[in-house]
Amino acid sequence: MNREIVLGDLWGIQEGVWVQLWSGTVGAFLAAGVAVFVLAWSNRHQQKLMDRQITEQRREAALSRESAATAGLVDAANGFLIAADSGRDEIQAQVLAFRSASFRWQMELDDLNLVIDLIGWANVFSSIATGKHTENLQFGESERSKEWAGELTGAIATVFAFSLSWYRMPDEREDAIKTLKESRKKIEKRIADLSPASQ
């Protein structure tokens, strides 16, 4: 039983046409397979690039928000210079502005130790500004008033320097917080010495 299939007998199509038809069909399937592979590879590659780009954009946005929070903190600290010459209500408003800026920075950094220390700085600024204001009310621009002003300027400069160093040394932030806390303690001691009760 020798059965041969003669392609020329099927539907009246010649054998050479069948060969071309099947080679075209097989070629089309292979081309489609290659196209699907290239498309899948290209999509994976594009997804990786997009993921990197999104990660970089998130990092830059977080850095921008952190920078804005830091600028708000420094601005609130500087506001004590004007508040000290204006009055107790302005000083209290500045305390709220500084605490608000501290919390905003903490929300960006998620560092509770830092915000606790910065709230301590709000109290330092408030004490110095109130001392300067009280001295000005009682005695005008006296030597003691100038000492209060010097302490206030020094305290603001300390927080400003800390804020700048925060970005320049990310690996040493714990040490920077420790130094900030120690600086605050020293200033608090000097404030106690300047206060009328210590005289």
Image (tube, rainbow, N blue to C red):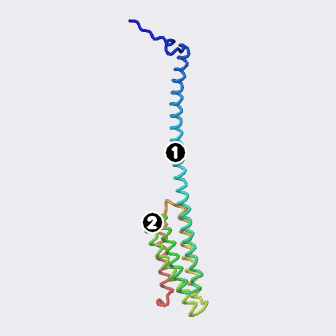
Q: Residue at x 58, y 86 (%)?
A: 86
4 w.r.t. 180: above or below: above
Q: Quadrant of the N terminus?
A: top left
Mark 2, residue position: 111
Q: Residue at x 48, y 77 (%)?
A: 186
27 w.r.t. 177: above or below: above
Secondary structure of residue under mark 2: loop
Mark 1: few, some, or many residues within 10 Å (few <14, many ≥20)?
few
- Residue 38 image position (x, y, % from top left): 53, 35
- Residue 95 image position (x, y, % from top left): 51, 79
Sequence order check, earlier mark of 1 and 2? 1
**141 or 113: which is nearer to us?**
113
Instruction: Give the residue furthest to the front.
Output: 11
> How many marks can you see?
2
Instruction: Give the residue furthest to the top.
Output: 1
Q: CA distance from mark 1 to mark 2?
A: 33 Å
**Mark 2 belongs to which amino acid?**
Asp
Mark 1, residue position: 47
- Residue 146 image position (x, y, % from top left): 59, 85
**Mark 1 belongs to which amino acid?**
Gln
**71 or 100: which is nearer to us?**
100
Secondary structure of residue under mark 1: helix
Is 99 on the left or on the right of 85, as rendered? left
In the picture, residue 42 is in which quadrant? Answer: top right
**145 or 33: which is nearer to us?**
33
145 w.r.t. 184: above or below: below
> Viewer-nearest of labels 1 and 2?
1
- Residue 78 image position (x, y, % from top left): 58, 76
